[in-house]
Image (cartoon, rainbow, N blue to C red):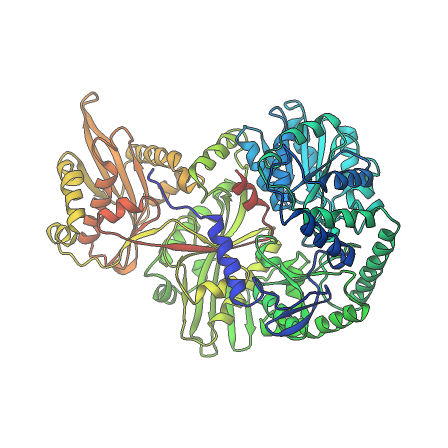
Amino acid sequence: MAKIKHNNFMNTVDEVIGHAKAQGVVHLYAEDTYLNGRHLTIDGNLLYHFGTTGYLGLEQDVRLKKAAIQAITKYGTQFPLSKTYISHPLYAELEEKLTTMYNHPIVITKNSTLGHMAVIPCAVDDLDAVIIDHQVHWSVQQATQLLRLRDIPVGMIRHNNMNMLEDRIKQLKGRYNHIWYMADGVYSMYGDVAPIDDLKSLCALYPQLRLYYDDVHGMSWKGQHGTGFIMNAYGTLPENVLVFGTLSKTFGASGAVLVCPDVTLHRKIKNFGGPLTFSAQLEPSAVAAAVASAKIHLSDEIYDLQDSLISKVKYFNRLLTSTNLPLIESNNTPVFYIGTGMPVTGYRFVKRLMNAGFFVNLGLYPAVPVKNTGVRITVSRHNKKADICALVDAMSYHYPKALAETQTTMSRVYKLFKKEYTLPSDVTEVSNTLKLDYKTHITAIDKTFWNRYMGHDNFDWDGLKFLETVFKAHPELTHRWAFHYFIVTDADDNPVVMTYFTTTLTKDDMLTKASVSKKIEAIRASDPLYLSSKVTGMGTLFTTGSHCFIARNHALWQSAFSLIFNALEDINKAHRIGVTMLRDFLKDDAVLNPFFHDKGFVKVDLPDRSRITKVLWKDTASYIASLTKRSRRHFNKDIAPFTEQFNIAFKSHLSSETLADAYVLYQSVAAKNYGLNTFTYPFDLFEQMNTHPNWEFITLHLQDEQQGKMRLVGVMFCYKNEKGAIYIPSLIGMDYEFVRSHNVYRQLLFQTVQRAIQLSYTSIDFGVTAAFEKQKIGAINESMVAFVQADDNYTMALVDSL
C-alpha cells in the first residue's frame, strides 16, 4: 500500500513541553546573583527551593567550592585529551578514593548518560538478551537502542512487575548466555525503589540473570560511605551486578561512576567504552570538587549529613499524613509526588505555590502518563523544618483551590491514580445547567435529531445501526465492539456536545511504522493477540470524519466535554480499559488542542484525511475540467487509457460467488496495509453489507483469457449516507496482479467520484492512507490528529522502542 504519515514521538513531546512552557512552569531561569540552596529567585520573586536533586546540599559546601577554584587556577578550565592517552593530575586521587568507598573496581564517566552508552554495549554480549523496566531512566533506555543494531533482543516489562520479569526470563533462559535486567535503584518521579529482595531471589533461581542498576537518585544520602541505595541493600556486590552512581546531584560535583565487581569486564569497559575513549574527560574543577566530596563520604561526617536529611524526610512524611494531599508513593526517600491528575490542575497548583513562595517541579508526560501529572517535591538539607511546615500548609490551602479552578475533585484525582470507583449505568446525569444522556444503542436516540447534528460528515444513524448489528455482539473478541453515545444538552435542551465512542480491541502498533508492524505480525503468527489492547476511541475503527458535534459558541461546551470525560473514566475503569482516544480533529485547531491537553490528552499525528467537499460537477467532462493541470495529465495517462478495458458496474447486491471473490481481494489489501495495522474484518461484515440498502459495490472486471470469463480485479465498498450528504468509500479490494499493469487503484478512485456525481452527493470521504494518490483525483488532504490518554506509558514506550 502507499505510504502514510506516522506520528513522531518527538513532536508529541514538543507539544506537551511547549504547552507547559507557555503556562510558565518549565524552562524557567533562576535570577539570583548567588545561590545558597535554600532559595531561588524567579521572575523577581524569592522562593523556597523544593526542586533540587542535591539532597545533601554538598554543591554549596565551601570545601568543594575551594577545591574547584584551586584546580582551575592550577590546571585550567579543562584538560582537552582523551583519558585513553592520559588523565589530568587529579584523576588518580579520585579513582583511588572512589575505589575505597565502594570496595570494588570503578570506572569514572563524564556523566551517567554517556556512561550508560559506554558500558551497556561493552557489558552485553551478542549472545545475551536484555529486559528493561518500563520506568528505568531515559538514558538507560537510549543506550539499549545501540544493542538492537547488533540484533540483541531488548524487551520491556511493566514497572517493578516481578512476575512479568520471571516469565520473560523463562522464555529467554534456554536461548541466551546472560539475561540482563536494567532498573533504577530509586526512581526519580515517585521516589519508589527497585524490589531488591525479589531480584536477589530471581538471581538465585536463574544464574543467567545479570542486574544493571542506575542508582543516581540513591547516591550519597544512603549507604555506607554514601555509596547509595543499591550498595546499602547489597553490602558487597556479586559479580552479576553492575551499579551506576553519580558524582553530580547529591555528590555535589560532576560526572558518574560505574561499580563493576567483575574484574575482567571492568578491564574490557575501561579499555574501550566508546564515549570513554572518544569523549572529553571531566574538567579539573569537577574532579577536584569530587575529590573533596569523596573525602567527606569517607569520613563519619557523611552519616551526620544523612541523618540530618532523613530527619527532614520523616518530618515531611509526618506532616503529610495529617493532610488530604494525595501522596502517590509513601516511602523514605527524599522524593515525593503529589498527584494532580490533569495537566491543567498541575499547572495551576505549581503556579499557586510559586506565587506563595515555593518552587517545586512539575511531573508531566513523558516522564509520567499525561493524566498522572503531579508535583514532584524534593527535600534537601538546605530546607529548614520551618520551610517544610510552611510548604505543607501552602499545599493544603492551594491544592483544593487548584482543583476547584480546573473543575476537578479530590475523588477524581484518586480515580486517575487507579482508586476504586463505579460505572455509571445507562442513565441521565445532571451537572449545573447541563444534562448528560449516555446510551449504548443508537436506537435509543431519535434518528432525525441525531442526523441533524451528526449525519453529514460521518456515518449517519442508519450507518451506526448497521455497525452495531455487525459488531456489537460479534462472537470473535477482535471484532466485538461496545458502543457509547453521549449527548450533553443545556437547560433549554439544546445540544452542546454530541459524540460517540466504541470500545474495541486494537493493535497497539496501529499507527506505527510499517517496518515495526511487520516485526510484530511475525510474533502474532503464533500469538494473535500480542500487543493488542482495549481502547475506547471516539468514532469507530471503520469510520473517519467528524465524530462529534460541538456548539463552540456555547459558554458551557468545555464543561460539557468534562461531563463526557468523567463518564468515560468510569466506563474504562469498570472494564479495565487503559486508553481513551479522541480522534479526527484538525491539527492546527487553536481552541481544541490546548483544551484537550489540559484535560489529560496527548496529541499525536494521524494519517491525512482525504475528501472532496464540494461535488458540483454535472458530468465527467466538467469534473476533469476542474482538475489541476498536473492532475489532468495524471488522468489522461493513468486512468483514461484503461477505463474501456474494464467492465465497470455499480451494484447494490453481489452474488455469493462474487462476494466471496470480493472478500478475497479485500483480504489481499488488508494483508499489505501495515501502515494502518488493524484486524482484518470478518466475512459476515460483507454479508451484512450485501443485504443493506445503504451499501453498494463498485466492481471492476477484466476478461480472463485463460479461463474464458470475466475476472474481478477491483472492488470499492461504499456507504451512501442519508440525503446525499456524503458518499463514503469505506473499504477496498484489489487483485495485485493488475494493480500496476492496469492502475486498478486509481481507476477505483475515479469511478468513486463518477458514482458520487451520478447520485448527486455533495461530498466524498476517501478516508486515510494513500493521500497523494487521492490528491491526484481532486481530493483535498487535511492534517489530522488524535488526542490520547493512557493509564500508563508502558505500551506506547514498548512499541516506540521497537
Foreground pick, 354 / 583: 354
- In the rendered view, tell whether residue 370 sits above or below residue 128: below
Q: Which residue is the extreme one toward the top?
A: 706
Foreground pick, 609 / 70: 70
* Residue 67 place in picture, x, y as percent: 74, 52
Q: How many marks?
A: 0
* Residue 428 place in picture, x, y as percent: 54, 68
Classify the position of the N terminus by image quarter: top left
Relative to 175, is 774 on the left or the right? left
Give residue 199's quadrant in the image: top right
* Camera sees residue 136: no
- In the rendered view, tell whether residue 170 sits above or below residue 408: above
Q: Which residue is the extreme one toward the right?
A: 300
- In the rendered view, tell whether residue 630 sits above or below residue 703: below
* Residue 320 place in picture, x, y as percent: 78, 65
Give residue 207's quadrant in the image: top right
At 33% from the left and 39% from the top, the residue drawn is 2
Give residue 107's quadrant in the image: top right
Q: Which residue is the extreme one toward the front?
A: 74
- In the rendered view, tell whether residue 776 sits above or below residue 352: above
Relative to 33, is 438 on the left or the right? left
Foreground pick, 31 / 707: 31
* Residue 55 place in picture, x, y as percent: 75, 56
* Camera sees residue 462: yes
